[in-house]
């Protein structure tokens, strides 16, 4: 079952159910799939980007990364079963991968982030097999040779789980364009998670995460990069959800 927020269908699975479905698919050897982790900004972007919406429609799982989606679903009388935070999902899947022998590849992040996240995770889980990391250069998506290099690296590593930290909607568009060719059982877009795991970006205290104030903490830490997303984006998202509740939202 899926919950509609702003015309976007969000899966109504708990965190543990999402982990179980991803691990089960990765172990099954079935056709490649991908997972998207929307927050409020994704929902706003999806309103005006038809290609992005189609990518979401075809996803294996659409899981609520942002607390604002949980609040919105409750306000719309269609509650979700908890948050599936992208960073928590990344860390949990790596922990299980170490137990199940699943191979992992990290693509994206700031320079050095994926490699440092690899070191952090392998220190926690000595059995974890991170078979490759790569940080593509700026504007790589417009460079044919670079795109071919990325695919060749991932194919050679032959991972079971591919985590992509390129930011939305770039990471989702890259995954959708390449996941079939790559043949990786599960690809997941996880935004800034490499930096958070590597402690290159400080994560909000747990109490702020639980109160839904992680966005405020990130705004304080990185104001120049995130002010537009939160100062402008949050009111726009609230208005979008209110229009849906009032029945005046026109879905495209």
Image (cartoon, grey):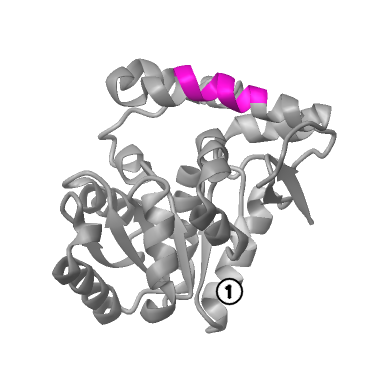
At 48% from the left edge and 75% from the top edge, which residue is drawn?
185
Depicted 238 relative to depicted 51: above or below: above
Q: Position of residue 70 (x, y in %)?
A: 69, 34
Query: How far across and how far down the image is residue 67, in percent?
Result: 61, 31
Question: Does 185 sit above or below residue 61?
Answer: below
Residue 232 lies in the magenta-colored region: yes
Name the residue nearer the viewer: 154 or 116: 154
Q: Is residue 240 magenta?
A: no
State which quadrant residue 18 falls in: bottom right
Report the residue at 52% width, 41% height from top.
42
Q: Neighbour class for label 1 at 10 Å: few (<14), some, many (≥20)?
A: some
Q: Which residue matches tag 1? A: 25
Q: Residue at x 28, y 20 (%)?
A: 224
Seen at 61% across and 43% down, the residue is 64
**Looking at the image, is 214 positioned above or below residue 180?**
above
- The percent position of residue 228, horizontal first and vertical second, equals 39, 22
Q: Secondary structure at mark 1?
A: helix
Q: Quadrant of the N terminus?
A: bottom right
Q: Nearer the viewer, residue 64 or 157?
A: 64
Q: Which region shows up in magenta?
A: 231-239
Give the number of callouts: 1
- Side of 127 relative to 185 (left or right): left
The answer to whether residue 230 is seen in the rendering is yes
Magenta stretch mostly in which secondary structure? helix
Q: Is any part of residue 85 visible from this angle?
A: no
Tell me which corner region of the image, top left, top right, bottom left or bottom right, holds residue 54.
bottom right
Residue 170 horizontal/vertical position (percent):
36, 51
Residue 197 horizontal side relative to residue 145, left or right: right
Quarter-wise, where is residue 171 in the image? bottom left
């Amino acid at each position: 079952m899926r919950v509609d927020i702003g015309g976007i269908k969000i899966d109504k699975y708990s965190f543990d159910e999402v982990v179980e479905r991803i691990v089960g698919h990765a172990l099954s050897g079935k056709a490649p799939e991908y997972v998207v982790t929307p927050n409020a900004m994704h929902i706003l972007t999806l309103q005006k980007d038809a290609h992005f919406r189609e990518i979401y429609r075809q996803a294996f799982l659409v899981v609520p990364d942002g607390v604002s989606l949980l609040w919105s679903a409750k306000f719309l009388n269609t509650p979700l079963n908890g948050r599936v935070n992208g960073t928590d999902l990344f860390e949990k899947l790596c922990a299980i991968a170490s137990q199940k022998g699943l191979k992992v590849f990290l693509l994206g992040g700031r320079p050095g982030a994926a490699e440092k996240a690899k070191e952090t995770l392998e220190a926690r889980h000595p059995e974890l097999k991170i078979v490759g990391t790569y940080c593509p250069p700026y504007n790589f998506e417009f460079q044919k040779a670079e795109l071919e290099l990325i695919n060749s690296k991932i194919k050679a590593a032959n991972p079971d789980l591919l985590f992509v930290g390129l930011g939305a909607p770039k990471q989702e568009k890259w995954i959708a364009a390449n996941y079939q060719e790559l043949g990786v059982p599960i690809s997941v877009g996880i935004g800034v998670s490499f930096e958070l795991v590597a402690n290159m970006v400080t994560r909000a205290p747990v109490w702020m995460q639980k109160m839904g104030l992680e966005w405020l903490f990130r705004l304080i830490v990185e104001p120049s990069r995130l002010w537009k997303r939160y100062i402008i984006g949050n009111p726009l998202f609230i208005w979008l959800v209110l229009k849906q509740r009032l029945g005046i939202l026109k879905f495209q």
